[in-house]
Image (cartoon, rainbow, N blue to C red):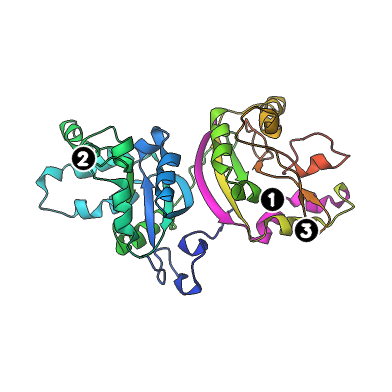
Amino acid sequence: MAGLHRGPWRCAVSAAEKPMSGAVVEGVDFARWAVILCKPDAVERGLVNRILQMISLAGIRVCDRMDVVAQAWQAHVVYRDLLADTGRLDLRDLPSYIDAAYVGRKVTIALAHGDPGMHARLRQVIGHTDPTRAAAGTIRGDLGEDSVAAAASQKRLVRNLVHISDDPAAARREYGTWYGPGIRLQVSDFHRCSVILCKPDAVQRGLVDAVFDRLAAAGATIANRIDVTVQPWQAHVHYWDLLVDADWFPDRDIPACLDDAYAGKTLTVALAYGEPLSPLARWSLSVPLRHAESVPDSPVKATSPERSPGGGELSAQLNVTSEISTPPFLMASSIAEHNSRHPTYSVRDHG
């Protein structure tokens, strides 16, 4: 889904805050916005969800989460103040430390929204730069395992999990760094990469993390996660075969069903990397997701089909691309399985 609108203005901000133009935007009140950077050590230790939850529990809204592979220039911009501080002789090797810590490694980016003064509040939530000096109850104090002394002795950056833009100017700069046109999807083999689409009902019910956790447990590597507001054309392109093969559902208005289920609603998209599997193997792996409600204590529960004003039903929760790839997982349910002509799932279905 290319050309998606994303950024601070998407998270229920006023019209006055909307940007005028450019990736490094003007017209947004960055006193109310901050960029959250979950560093490679947070990603590798599986702490991203917990870190973002701790920020949310502090009363700060978190949105527009995105997983990316860091490029050198992005890390350099984040550390620009230290790199430009010529008086810090102890950091003369900082460029090499930054490159070793970030370049080519996965990070998770998100936006935080709150009242003016939120940057100071966020600094309190994450804690002291040195985890050994961070107070209990802070992110670094509770989750940190490194120290500035250990990092200095090993000639590297301290692994302290998370970075928050320090002030409105930094928020504006770092928003452009991570959410601007420099972002490139790291896709090289679509036989090993699928697009995961967590549908609006999964977002509304708070099941997105549970869905991704289950896919990861099945062997997928989840990356490039982003929340988007669906435009009608995107749903139409995604479900092109249902729109073209009208005889699948002669009793309903498919365009109206799609618009009702998707247009203007928030969903989460990500990429899943894994080894190619045959359609039969994919089907066998899809059963736990499709029938999750039969599994005791499953975090993913099957849902009833959604009714639309067009008189049709649309299935729920999850979609995984199947035409351009051979992914090792399938969607939770499919529109076509509600049609008597297609009582079981086929790799053609896009539900």
Which residue extends farthest bottom? 16
Residue 43 or 86: which is nearer the viewer? 43
**Which mark identifies residue 133?**
2
**Looking at the rendering, in which quadrant would you find the C terminus?**
top right
Residue 349 or 160: which is nearer the viewer? 160
Which region of the structure is painted magenta?
219-247
Task: Look at the image and tell me whether residue 270 can be seen.
Answer: yes
Q: Is residue 142 left or right of residue 155?
A: right
Location of residue 116 (image quadrant): bottom left
| Secondary element at image label 3 | helix
Task: Look at the image and tell me whether residue 182 can be seen.
Answer: no
Going from N to C along the chain, the mark reached first, 3 or 2, is 2
Residue under the image location 40 percent in, 42 percent down:
51
For label 1, the crowd category at 10 Å Cα-Cα, with few meaning under 14, some 14 to 19 and many 20 or more, is some
Foreground: disc 3 or disc 2: 2
Going from N to C along the chain, the mark reached first, 2 or 1, is 2
Distance from the alpha carbon under mark 3 to that under mark 1: 12 Å
The amino acid beneath tag 2 is Arg
Q: Is residue 200 above or below residue 157?
A: below
The amino acid beneath tag 3 is Pro
The amino acid beneath tag 1 is His
Q: Is residue 250 left or right of residue 70?
A: right
Q: Which residue is mark 1?
A: 238
Q: Which residue is mark 3?
A: 255
Going from N to C along the chain, the mark reached first, 3 or 1, is 1
| Secondary element at image label 1 | helix
Residue under the image location 49 percent in, 46 percent down:
185
